[in-house]
Structure formats: structure tokens, C-alpha cells
Amino acid sequence: MDIYQVLKNDHDELKVLVDELVNLNEDDDFRFILIDQISDLLVPHSRAEESIFYNSLRVVNADKKITFLGFQEHLEVEGQLRQLQIKDKLSLDWKATAEKLRNSLLHHIEDEETEIFAEARTAFTKQESESMGDAFVQLKAKVQKEGFIKHTADMIINMMPPRLIDKLKNLGEPRT
Ligand SMILES: [Fe+2]
Ligand SMILES: [Fe+2]
């Protein structure tokens, strides 16, 4: 499957989850499960998307503004998710934050599926988009297995200039 389709499948799944979340009653405990499900999909999706898709766009010198916008929106959406996780534990008004998260996420998905996909379609061949799709699926599974902490560092490394990324990532690998 090509990268556009695998990313869109995750986006569709995320949209269903956030819609379900904002429609819950204030005191519905099912929110704990939904927030975990959103986090378990959103964070690995975003890290793999940055590593495979955004970084490939940067390597082929696509419009820098577009990938920067994507990174910025990831930070914003994940900040709201963290806020929601904290508010939820404290039982503060979680619904307002859930609404904000939903709006930012829908806005981000719209930007990716229009502007960013359009830029990518001019930059990559059909075969490249298939290979990126496979690489994305594998990396996302790896992030899901390894957990959140290591991949927060990856988010920061992913924002470095493309030619430095591999070197920086290798610094963190154990020597054999
Ligand atoms: Fe995405
Ligand atoms: Fe994204």
C-alpha cells in the first residue's frame, strides 16, 4: 500500500476515536480507554510519519514551509493530548481540552491530506511512495513496541537538518 493510503487509514481511525471522545458525557469512564487508544495510535503514527515521510520530503528539498508546518502541528496536537491526560487524572474539565485536541487534529489531518500530500505527489515516484508505505508500517510497529520515551528524543532529532539525522540517531544506538 502506498504511503498516502497507510497514513489516511490511520487518520480515519483517529477521527473516529476523537469524535467518540468528545461525544462522551463528562463522567463517562470510557474516556480513559479512548484517551489511551488515541495516544497509542497518534504518537507512533506521528514519529513514523516524521521519520519516513517528512524526512524524505526534506531530503528531496520539498517546500520547507510545508514540512515545518507539519512538525509544528504535531507538537501542538501532542501538547493537547498530554494536557488531556493530566486533566483527566485530576478530573478537571477534560471536555474543553478534548474539543481543542479534536479541532487541532482535524485541522492537521486536513493540511496533510491536501497540501502535504500534493507536494509529496510531485516529489516521489509511485515506487517510492509504495516503499515509504512499507517502511512506515514497520517503523510504526517498532515505535509501538518500544514505547514513548525513546521516541520523544526522535521527535527532536527529526527536526535537525536531514544530513545530520542518521548520524544523530546512531549516537543513541548501543555499540556492538
Ligand atoms: Fe498523519
Ligand atoms: Fe501528522
Image (cartoon, rainbow, N blue to C red):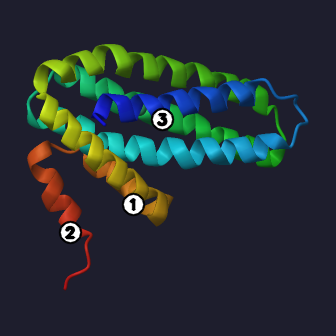
Q: Position of residue 131 (x, y in %)?
A: 20, 43
Q: CA distance from mark 3 to mark 2?
A: 31 Å
Disc nearest the viewer among 3 and 2: 3
- Seen in the picture, residue 15 relative to 107 is either above or below; the reply is below
Residue 121 visible in the current orientation: yes
Q: Which label sits on residue 10? A: 3
Q: Amino acid at mark 2?
A: Leu
Task: Of the two numbered discs 1 and 3 on the same chain, state the one appearing first in sequence.
Answer: 3
Would you say the beta carbon of the disc 3 residue lies within 8 angstroms of ligand 1? Answer: yes
Tell me the residue that label 2 is attached to. Answer: 171
Q: Are marks 1 and 2 in contact (CB under 8 Å)?
A: no
Q: Nearer the viewer, residue 136 or 99?
A: 136
Q: Amino acid at mark 1?
A: Lys
Q: Residues within 10 Å of mark 2 (few under 14, many from 20)?
A: few
Q: Position of residue 36 (x, y in %)?
A: 66, 48
- Seen in the picture, residue 80 relative to 138 is either above or below; the reply is above
Task: Of the two numbered discs 3 and 2 on the same chain, state the one appearing first in sequence.
Answer: 3
Task: Of the two numbered discs 1 and 2 on the same chain, state the one appearing first in sequence.
Answer: 1
Q: Residues within 10 Å of mark 3 (few under 14, many from 20)?
A: few
Tell me the residue that label 1 is attached to. Answer: 142
Total numbered labels: 3
